[in-house]
Every structure is written in structure tokens, then in C-alpha cells.
Image: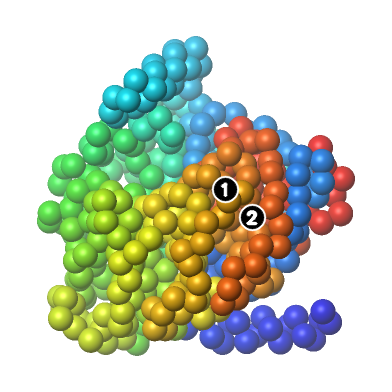
Amino acid sequence: MTNWTRCGLVLFWLMTQGAGFAQDSAKTTDWSNWRGPLYDGTSPDADPPIRWSETENVRFKVPIPGESLASPIVHDGRIYLLSAEALDADSYSRNLASAEAVRERGEWPPQVSPVPHAFYLYALDADDGSVVWKRKARESTPHESHYLDTSFACGSPLTDGELIYAHFGSNGTYAYSMDGELVWERDLGDMLTRNGFGEGSSPALAGDLLIINWDHEGESFVVALDRKTGEEVWRRERPGEVTSWSTPLALDTPKGQQVVISSTGRSRSYAAATGDVLWSLGGMTVNQIPTPTERNGLVYLASGYRGNMLQAVDVGSASGELESSAAVRWTYERDTPYVASPLIYGDQIYFIKHFRNILTALDADTGEVRFGPERLTHLSQVYASPVAAAGRIYIFGRDGASVVLRHGSSLEILAENELDDGVDATPALVGNRMYVRGRRSLYCLENGSPGN
């Protein structure tokens, strides 16, 4: 592909991304939040490898201490990620084993009891994975457990190029300079999560505001903090909401900037500047996890635990309660995702059933089925959200297996790959590289690298 052709494709992509693209000035060549530069799981200019293994196309593999499902982000040649490290590793290992025994006996829920932890933000060199700096945000004993397959650090960091925001939920929210200087910190209290499953929502940036959703078994709320100072700008109660793990979506619309939060009770859109509710819609299932996604003025809301629902909402015309509104363009009620967020690529929306290995693709404008449900036999369980670049879809399974698909109206598998480490975090696509956070290690996958 010539440089002119690549530039033309990038320009076309940017022109067709709709209202959500102008959310901030982050470079598309970076991956500044866990959903990527366009907030939809895609990169317009990345071209990562198609095939890899432990011995092929691995630029580096570096160990990351502690436990975390937080996705890596990449900005200006550095990788940023979070980790929670047990200060009493033996006790924590025993608690993990105890929770595993509960699951093996068929009991519920398999909770991991807390021990003292240190909560860290890492900055790594994007070329070799070396630690540029490491900052300890806090040492504390979490007030409640987490689910066996998660951790005490599940929210992902994000950056606007001026500050890096590290959100550990009940263990505090922190803003650091790009050189690792603590600028501000904020404690919003303690969450009480359903069944002690733990926390996982990440913040979102809306202009000069950092938006944090606090849905739990107590008094739920959403709060907007001044991104530069951490001071509270507005807070709104979220009546009737219970624990959810969905990250807010900030986007520009003809009605001004909105913040959309998908929830078990009612999905709501807030005016970013004031916190006023602009519209709401019921219909999601319990244990809401997938994050809203936007394309050309349509916002997609999805959930898939104890039910199935995918809704496409026209944010330009949405106002008030939408149950009988034409602003709900279409709905789809089969094989929708429980954990992984949907992927919007071109004119299609891709999603995984529950957290299984079953993929469906719909026309993003009409909801008509393009293909699926199709079983991806190389995969088993999937937590990481699909990502896309260069006309390809990348999907990782929890055991480190992955598939690469050609973007299109039928299922075409280009490659099936495996890594030794399990993968629950969403990868980051930057340039000709893919940064993949495993349970124990961070991989950089790049064409032509010899491997470890």
C-alpha cells in the first residue's frame, strides 16, 4: 500500500467516524484509553501483525508484578498500566486457592478475601518494555473481596497527554504528570459490589472533566471532577441503580457534549457540562459490563447476562424517556455480550455472546445480520473486548489463544495464534505493534521480531 493510499484511507475513516471523534485532541497514532483513539476499539492507522507465538513476532515480553485486568494504554512512546500487588503474597495465594476450591465444589460466589495491597501506576518504554518510572498510589487493605477471575485493579488508566488518570475505585483516584509527579488524588468512598465481585469501571474524559460512574449496592451516583485539580464539579444520584462495571462514553453531539452510561436499571445520557439527564432508556440485563460505543450519531448499548439486549439510539433526536421513541433505531435480542464490549468497524458491529466463543456481526445502521452466530473454535472464554485495524478483527481468549478475522460480511479467519499467558485485558494497537497484557506479562507483538 502506498503512503498516498494509506493517507487517503485514514482521511476517509476520520471523516466517517461521526459525532464522537472530537472528544479530545489525542493523536490517533496513540491508544490513550482502553477503547482506543476513536473510543470504539479501532485504530485508523495501526497495522499490527497477523500471526504470532511465543517464538514469532514478539518484540518483547516483560513480567508485570501483581494482579490486574486493567488494559494498557500508549502515549508518546510510553505504555501506562495499573497493578495491585499483595503485600502478603502467601496469604493472598491462600485466599485465591480457597476461592478456587469454592468454585470447584460448585458453591457460589468464589470470593477472594482481601489482604493489604499496594496500588501502582507503571510507565514503560514502548520500544523495549523497560520501566521508566513506577509510582505507588496507596497501600491499603481493600474493604471487600473480589471475584476469583478478577483483581483489585480492574479499571484502566487514561491520558489526555497532560495528565495520566489512575482509578482504583474504592482505593482512590489519582492524577499524575507525564513524568510521574502526583498532581492530585481523590477518595470517593467505598463501593459495595454485588456478591463481593469487586470493581471494574474506568473513568472517561469529557473536555476538562473526568467522569466516574459509581454504581453499587449502596447509593449510586455519577460524579464529574475537574481533570486538572480533582475538585468536584457536579454529582448526580442514580436512583435504582445497582452494581455495574460499564465505563461511561463521552461524545460530541448536535445538542452539545453528552456522557452516556449503560446500566442495569436505565441507561442515561447526561449533559457533560451540568450533569442534567438528557434521555434515558430501560432494557439492559443485570450485571451490566459492556461500554457504550458510537458511530455516526448512533450509540450502541449492550448487555448479555440473564437475557440479551443490543439497542441503537440516535443521540441527535433522543430526549426524555425513549421506550416509545423513534430515537431507538433498532434492537437485537440474541447472543449479546456479557463482558466484552461490542466493536464498531466500518459499517458493522461485532460482538461476542456472553463471554463465550460465539461471534455475530450486524449492519450498524439497520441491525440486520451480516453473519453469525458463528463459533470460533480456537477460542473458549473471552473477557477482552475485540479490537480492529487494517481491515482485521483481533479477538483474544482467556487462555491466551486468539483469532484474527478479515473485516467483512462473512466470517473469514486469517490466523489462529497462541500465547503462554492468559489474556483478559483489551490490547492496544499502535503503529505496527500490538501491546497485550497477560495475567503475568506484557507482550509487544510486531512483525519481524524473533520472539522470546
In the image, residue 185 lies at what x, y percent? 39, 43
In the image, residue 78 lies at what x, y percent? 67, 51
N-terminal-most mark, 2 or 1? 1
Rendered residue at 42%/69% (across/down): 293
Rendered residue at 45%/54% (across/down): 340
What's the mark number on residue 370? none
Rendered residue at 49%/76% (across/down): 370
> What residue is shown with label 2?
403
Q: Nearer the viewer, residue 96 or 129?
A: 96
Q: Is residue 442 above or below residue 15?
A: above
Horizontal arrangement in the rendering, residue 49 relative to residue 306 (left or right): right
Q: Nearer the viewer, residue 95 or 252?
A: 95
In the image, residue 177 lies at what x, y percent? 55, 50
**Secondary structure type for disc 1:** loop
| Residue 229 placement: quadrant | bottom left
Q: Nearer the viewer, residue 334 or 363?
A: 334
Horizontal arrangement in the rendering, residue 175 relative to residue 221 (left or right): right
Rendered residue at 44%/76% (across/down): 369
Residues under labels 2 and 1: Cα distance? 8 Å
Amino acid type, callout 1 = Leu
| Residue 231 placement: quadrant | bottom left
Amino acid type, callout 2 = Val
> What residue is shown with label 1?
379
Q: Is residue 111 above or below residue 351?
A: above
Q: Quadrant of the C terminus?
A: top right
Horizontal arrangement in the rendering, residue 201 relative to residue 69 (left or right): left
